[in-house]
Image (tube, rainbow, N blue to C red):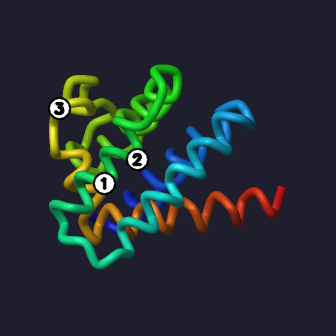
Amino acid sequence: MNENKTKGNLQKAINFITKLSSSKREKLMSILKKVNEVQSSNLTTKEKAKEIKRIMWSDQSTNTKLFIGAFLGAVTGLFIFGTGGIGIAALGTGVGVWGWLATAAGGAFISSLIQNYEKKENED
């Protein structure tokens, strides 16, 4: 993926987060930071995918799943499928999203998203 497209997708993710209410924004950033810790761990890719799914999906309330699902569908889907949506069925049962988040590419995206979002917050 070229650098301009990556930056554009990253900006879309930051825009999505900034439009959330402050409580949802704090919750999502907290979840993303936990995911980032898993991505940096010594677990295998399969173990990382399972742990990321637990953190982002299995351990969440229905309300939290709604905005996490929207985040994954609107943003992560751009990287995986090149479109704006991946379908809610893939979020609950598919390994594509979780597997991608467990890879170096997914890790770089989440890490960059956190850093750029926090930088933007400090500038505002």
Identified at 17% across, 32% down, the residue is 93
Q: How far apart, in angstroms, are the residues tagged by discs 1 and 2?
A: 6 Å
Identified at 30% across, 30% down, the residue is 85
Q: Quadrant of the N terminus?
A: bottom left
Q: Residues within 10 Å of mark 3 (few under 14, many from 20)?
A: few
* Kind of element beneath mark 2: helix
- Amino acid type of disc 1? Glu
Residue farthest to the right? 124
Q: Is residue 11 above or below residue 44?
A: above
Q: Residue 51: which disc? A: 1
- Amino acid type of disc 2? Ile
Please identify the quarter of the rendering in which residue 115 is found: bottom right
Mark 3 or 1, which is nearer the eye?
A: 1
**What residue sits right under mark 3 in the picture?**
93
> Total marks drawn?
3
Contact between marks 1 and 2 (CB within 8 A): the answer is: yes
Mark 3 and mark 2 lie on one chain; the one further toward the N terminus is 2
Q: How far apart, in angstroms, are the residues tagged by discs 3 and 2?
A: 15 Å
Residue 29 seen in this snapshot: yes
Mark 3 and mark 1 lie on one chain; the one further toward the N terminus is 1
Mark 3 or 2, which is nearer the eye?
A: 2
**Viewed as shown, does residue 20 lie left or right of 12?**
right
Q: Which residue is more in the foreground, 38 or 9? A: 38
* Kind of element beneath mark 3: helix
Contact between marks 3 and 1 (CB within 8 A): the answer is: no
